[in-house]
Amino acid sequence: IVERSQKVNEESKAIIHHTLNELDLEYLPTNANFLMHRINGDLATYRNRMAETGLLVGRDFPPMLEYNRLSFGLPNEMDRWAATIKDFRSKGWI
């Protein structure tokens, strides 16, 4: 079970890294099941827009108020997040 969980976590992390690299959004290295990534724009607005799509992301993480804390979900959930954040970019929101 642990090995399978680690594999799923690595798949999700790869999706996130690929997406953030594609969007040229800075993120901090991590060995945990979450990462911190920069948002170009207002973090509260970003979180609210994500919530409107049914995705709950981040919380305030002082003093890093320009970064979103993104927990890794299942790969299909991270694919949905990736599509959503790419849509946000196409609208000029991030």
Image: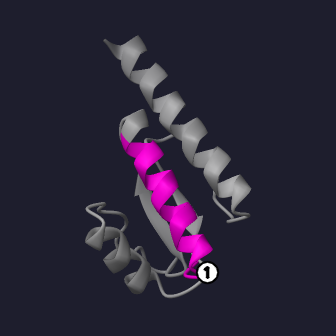
Looking at the image, which is closer to me, 15 or 83? 83
Q: Where is residue 6 in the image (x, y as percent from the top left)?
A: 44, 22
Q: Tell me, yes or no, whether the highlighted magenta stretch contains residue 82.
A: yes
Q: Is residue 12 left or right of residue 14?
A: left
Query: What residue is shown at x 56% (from left), y 86% (from top)?
Result: 41
Residue 49, quarter of the rendered image: bottom left
Query: What residue is shown at x 37% (from left), y 22% (from top)?
Result: 5
Looking at the image, which is closer to me, 13 or 83? 83
Q: In this view, does 69 lie above or below 35?
A: below
Q: Is residue 94 left or right of residue 23?
A: left
Q: What element carries label 1?
A: loop
Numbered marks: total: 1
Residue tagged 1: 40
Looking at the image, which is closer to me, 67 or 39? 39
Q: Position of residue 7 (x, y in %)?
A: 47, 20
Q: Tell me, yes or no, whether the highlighted magenta stretch contains residue 83.
A: yes
The answer to whether residue 30 is visible is no
* Structural crowding at the residue carrying mark 1, measured as other residues with C-alpha within 10 Å and reported as few (<14), some (14–19) or many (≥20): some
Image: magenta residue range: 77-94
Q: Position of residue 32 (x, y in %)?
A: 47, 41
The answer to whether residue 20 is visible is yes
Query: What residue is shown at x 52% (from left), y 72% (from top)?
Result: 88
Residue 18, quarter of the rendered image: top right
Specify the quadrant that holds the N terminus.
top left
Name the kind of residue labelled 1 in the image.
Asn
Magenta stretch, main secondary structure class? helix
